[in-house]
Amino acid sequence: MIKDNTVAAQKDFDKAVRFMDNAKKELKLARKNGEEFQDVKHMQVACGTAYLAVLKAVDGIFILRNIPKPKKKGSIEYYQDGLSRIDKKMLSSLNMAYQILHLDGYYNGYNDAITILRGFEKADFIILKLKQAL
């Protein structure tokens, strides 16, 4: 069972890394001009993809910790509740990634480069946590 969990978590890690690589490529297409991204559409796609990478990484962490999958798919509360029992710093990073990448960047098209890049840092932090757990 432990080996199966590690294999499943590794698959989630690989997906998270692939998603994050794609998000960073997409963010380059958004062309940063000073403190803002010029092409909001590319920035929104980048933010949405980076947020999906965060969720994949947390899924992998939950597999390793034997936290069951949610009944309601895509619920941020599931991720917040699970991380609140594991690691408060990771929970804080998830909350920031949710706000910056998902709500501000993806939904609202907020294109402040400093803020969006901070969201990407939080995503990288969570993915790194999964890598360390493997």
Image (cartoon, rainbow, N blue to C red):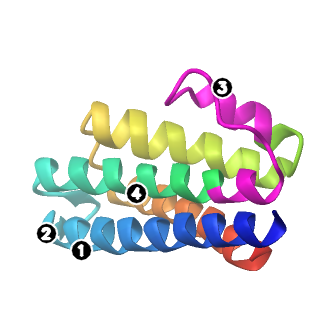
What type is the residue that disc 1 sits on?
Lys
| Residue 29's disc number | 2
User: Camera-side residue: 3 or 102?
Assistant: 3
| Residue 25's disc number | 1
Q: Position of residue 93 (x, y in %)?
A: 66, 51
The correct choice, above or below, for 5 with respect to 73 in the image is below
Q: Which residue is mark 3?
A: 77
Q: Position of residue 35 (x, y in %)?
A: 29, 61
Classify residue 88 as left or right of residue 127.
right
- The boundaries of the magenta stretch are 60-82
Does the magenta run of residues contain 71? yes
What type is the residue that disc 3 sits on?
Glu
Q: Which element is circle 2 on?
A: helix
Query: Which of the two discs, 4 and 1, labels the residue nearer the N terminus?
Result: 1
Classify residue 110 as left or right of residue 57.
left
Q: Which element is circle 3 on?
A: helix
| Measured Cα–Cα span from mark 2 to mark 1 | 7 Å
Q: Which residue is mark 4?
A: 50
How would you rate the neighbour count of disc 3 (Cα within 10 Å): few for under 14, some for 14-19, many for 20 or more? few
Residues marked 2 and 1 touching at CB (< 8 Å) = yes
What type is the residue that disc 2 sits on?
Leu
Q: Position of residue 1 (x, y in %)?
A: 81, 63
